[in-house]
């Protein structure tokens, strides 16, 4: 019986987004001569069955990427997903079953596992943070742009698989005015006014503030969201009261499983965290012949 951490199923990423990432990883691994070990040892017509199973507790993500890795090496490999993205696993739980040409399975093994282990680590870290925050408030856990170059789509999908939500996907999604923008513009008010004059009517504007005084400035000219940077729980509670529904409130900075409960209890709408993508530990999964 599978155990999903999600209240509703998430859609898989479009193959057009995933395949170039997997293809690049395979090309990196195959080099100029391919898998010389497997080619020397395994006869061309040999077939095998195998399973990819978890060796620890975690939440799965990256099954699509793993399946694509095997398919790109040889479409004759059959991949059956036993536990999909967003599913909790324990040691010994089978995630994928494989059946097909042995050469292809062994050649794609490491790339498939690298992506599956990495994305499952992100999903697991996210789920831990979501679970720690949930009893204390309504806040959604959101990731940032602090992602592994080239893997952003997969890592942001993994955050959703762990029960979190996504912040901006890229610089063109929304306006996010940071402290350096404010410094160059000469203040919060001129920065917001310049952004509003250039942004399209459907583009939302968020402004980072690190004090209640800066928050008042941002609210005075109007923004869609306010990023409350490195504020303690008392400051966050006061900030939420000041905002009073006029904008979305986002807490950021020094967010851990130990601190997230107090942050959520302040009443903020969002809690953003970079480490769930840039520093999450992998989940140990392995492939064994069945």
Image: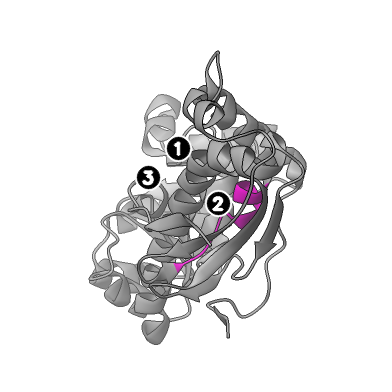
Across and down, in percent, residue 73 comes to 67, 35
Kindly state the secondary structure of the residue where label 2 is placed: helix
Across and down, in percent, residue 266 comes to 35, 76
The residue carrying mark 3 is 278
| Nearer-the-camera pick, 55 or 5 | 55
Q: Measured along the vertical axis of the image, is residue 180 above or below residue 284?
A: above
Left or right: 166 in relation to 173: left
The residue carrying mark 1 is 148
Q: Is residue 247 visible?
A: no
Across and down, in percent, residue 8 comes to 67, 77
> Is tag 3's residue or tag 1's residue first in the polypeptide sequence?
1
Whether residues under marks 3 and 2 lie with C-beta atoms below 8 angstroms apart, the answer is no
**Which portion, as a residue range, is magenta?**
59-67
Kindly state the secondary structure of the residue where label 1 is placed: loop
The residue carrying mark 2 is 156
> Is tag 2's residue or tag 1's residue first in the polypeptide sequence?
1
Disc marking residue 94: none
Whether residues under marks 2 and 1 lie with C-beta atoms below 8 angstroms apart, the answer is no
Q: Is residue 268 visible?
A: yes
Scheme of colours in the image: one colour
Rounded to the nearest angstrom, the CA distance separating label 3 from label 2 is: 11 Å
Q: Quadrant of the N terminus?
A: bottom right
Across and down, in percent, residue 228 comes to 37, 57
Q: Which of the 4 image quarters holds residue 212?
A: bottom left
Numbered label tally: 3
Whether residues under marks 3 and 1 lie with C-beta atoms below 8 angstroms apart, the answer is yes
| Residue pictured at 64% horizontal, 31% vertical | 23
Rounded to the nearest angstrom, the CA distance separating label 2 from label 1 is: 10 Å
Kindly state the secondary structure of the residue where label 3 is placed: helix
């Amino acid at each position: 019986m599978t155990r999903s951490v999600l209240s509703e199923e998430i859609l898989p990423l479009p193959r057009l987004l995933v395949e170039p990432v997997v293809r690049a990883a395979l090309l990196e691994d195959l080099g100029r001569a391919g898998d010389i070990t497997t080619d020397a040892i395994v006869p061309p017509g040999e077939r095998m069955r195998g399973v990819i199973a978890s060796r620890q507790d975690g939440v799965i993500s990256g099954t699509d990427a793993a399946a694509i890795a095997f398919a790109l090496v040889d479409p004759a490999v059959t991949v059956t997903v036993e536990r999909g993205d967003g599913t909790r696993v324990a040691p010994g739980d089978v995630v994928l079953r494989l059946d097909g040409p042995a050469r292809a399975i062994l050649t794609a093994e490491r790339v498939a596992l690298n992506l599956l282990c990495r994305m499952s680590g992100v999903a697991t870290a996210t789920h831990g943070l979501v679970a720690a925050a949930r009893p204390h408030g309504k806040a959604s856990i959101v990731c940032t742009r602090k992602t592994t170059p080239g893997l952003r789509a997969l890592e942001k999908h993994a955050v959703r698989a762990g029960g979190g939500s996504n912040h901006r996907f890229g610089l063109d999604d929304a306006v996010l005015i940071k402290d350096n923008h404010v410094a160059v513009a000469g203040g919060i008010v001129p920065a917001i006014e310049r952004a509003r004059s250039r942004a399209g009517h459907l583009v939302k504007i968020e402004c980072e503030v690190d004090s209640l005084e800066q928050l008042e400035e941002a609210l005075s000219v109007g923004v869609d969201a306010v990023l409350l940077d490195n504020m303690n729980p008392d400051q966050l509670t006061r900030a939420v009261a000041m905002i009073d529904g006029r904008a979305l409130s986002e807490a950021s900075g020094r967010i851990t499983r130990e601190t997230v409960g107090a942050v959520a209890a302040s009443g903020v709408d969002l809690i953003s965290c970079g480490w769930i993508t840039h520093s999450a530990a992998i989940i140990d999964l392995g492939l064994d012949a069945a």
